[in-house]
Image: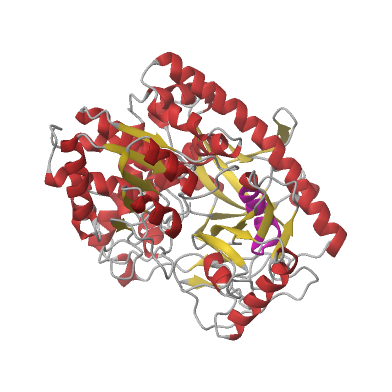
Amino acid sequence: MSYDIRKPLTVDQRNQYSGMSDTVAHLLFHRGITDSLSAQKFIKPDYEASTHDPFLLKDAEKSATRIILAIENNDRIAIYSDYDADGIPGAAIFNDFFKRIGYKNYSIYIPHRHDEGFGVNVDAVMQLAGDGVKLLITIDCGITDVEPIRVAGEKGIDVIVTDHHEPPTELPPAFAIIDHKQADCKYPDKNLCGSGVAYKLIQAILKKNRLGLKEGMEKWLLDLVGIATMSDMVPLLGENRTFAHYGLAVLRKSPRKGIMQLLRKLGINQRHLTEDDIAFMITPRINAASRMGVPMDAFKLLSADNDDDAYTAANHLDKINNERKGVVASLVKEVKKILHARYGESSPSPQTPQGGIGEDLSPQAGVLVATSIPAVIVLGNPDWRPSLLGLVANTVAEEYDRPVFLWGRDGNNIIKGSCRSEGRTNVVELMRAVPPDVLGHFGGHKHSGGFSVSNEDIHFIEKHLNDAMHTLLGRGSPLEPTRGVGENLSPQAGVNGDHLNDGSSRGTPIDMELSLDQVDTILYEDLNKMAPFGIGNPKPLFLFRNISPVSVRKFGKTSNHVEIVFKQLKGMKVPAISFFGAEIEWMNFLVVNKPIDMVASIEKSMFRNRPELRLRIVDIIKR
């Protein structure tokens, strides 16, 4: 991997950030926040000022009116959510809402990932119609489900679609569609997650009729909105930053029993909960439920109203998540074995600019690395379970720096798969460029998606995707070097010419260079003003040059984690951690008292309720 260090600010640039430290000003500027007012809003989001009128969403007011009518008529309402850590919190949001207003004539439907697949399906619609449902509200799905929603209409069910995925050419014949990505939707923020859209609908309902709820009570639902926002692949900017910020605040004092039990199980102090705890501890356990065939178990965790149910749900999700990790690790090993057998050790050169196709790419040319591995990796096996392939594809995409499409066969004998971007390729755009009818059903986000393929076309899908990639490149959607937000990068002299650029290409941006002695609580608290971190607001990265370890050790049950300890001039020890770092290449040249350069972020560990400032290793560079 190659790196660039961001340029320091000029005096005029620095003067835009009155009342802020040099470090925060530097970080804000290089994240595109270049004036004092925007900076203040970013550092201290204001709920009222930073959230938009829900009626700006197309069909939101129409939907709110229909839901209030259903409540007044005591019509049977069904909430139909996706089965992931975006959709399931959305189902729990509506469950909480109905309970708070005392409405009982509703049901929650979450499809079985393996047997039913993504989105609304006809069999589910028929079942709900048989149960007397008159109004169906989708969460995080529905925008592509034309036929099932047509059937619902024939059965006398009004459907309100709430979704955030890219709308297809043909929209479903729903009563209303709330999706801010519709071309004619004037909503100013186009980046909400599925549960975020669901929450906006509840805001719209309460704007028309409080239904007995006290003003502001809906803010207690922000813990669920926060989980979904920080779990899904959406930028933590704009309204999402507000949802994540206040979501964490609510989570840290939430009385939600399932969350409390899960955090207790995982040894996480609720008062000090971070976005990392959500992304790496809570989200995988919610997603594990559907991946292992029991999606309602995650809903039970988020909606549990007594300690016994909460305890049972938390323990069960932790157990099946451990099972899921074992299966995924085995699949990753199998995929890498196949790639090795086909292509040997070929992989992208770390010094060559790589990129992908997407709507935001500039015309500066990049070049595709000429290796034997195709531009798009496509692999499958009828025995692979589609529900687990997204995780596998993500790991492979990161390691091989290419878009990855993996497929298996579901419970209905249909070939389905998941795809993940390497970080630059818009996989939805890529799938759209494949000849019509090759992909029976596809959708998703810029960096992740799902698809189905016929038995006849599966043998040609690799060629179609790679042809599509090269066709799009030929039309001027080029490959582009990896980099973060902002153009203000300066080339720095390299170390052995391997990792730090000499100006010939752009690499991953490093925010600034620090010495070990600058790592202290004051700096951490300053950096923490920028939290929560995520897509669009990455954790600040720092370069530490010419530092020598005083100790190196492996730890963990299987000794797969690494701790390196450094010492400041004043004698204070600074630990640096790499989880699952024991097999990384830099371990081969890591020696006590031998100088290295290191790229790392700064974090505070609360393990066993003992605060410890430490570095999280991103890369180690041989001098």
**Horizontal side, residue 518 vs residue 188: left or right:** right
Magenta highlight on residue 457: no
Q: In terms of depth relative to the viewer, which is nearer, 20 or 585?
A: 585
Q: In terms of depth relative to the viewer, which is nearer, 175 or 118?
A: 175
Magenta stretch prevailing secondary structure: helix
Vertical comparison of 43 with 220: above or below: below
Q: In terms of depth relative to the viewer, which is nearer, 86 or 502?
A: 86
Q: Residue at x 39, y 35 (%)?
A: 108
Q: Quadrant of residue 545?
A: bottom right
Vertical comparison of 557 with 444: above or below: above
Q: Residue at x 43, y 60 (%)?
A: 146
**Quadrant placement of the C terminus:** bottom right
Question: Which residue extends farthest bottom?
Answer: 475
Q: Magenta part of the protein: which range?
A: 389-404
Magenta highlight on residue 403: yes
Expressed as whole percent of the image width and height from the top left, the position of residue 71 reads: 20, 37
Expressed as whole percent of the image width and height from the top left, the position of residue 211 reads: 14, 35
**Horizontal side, residue 234 vs residue 209: left or right:** right
**Quadrant placement of the N terminus:** bottom right
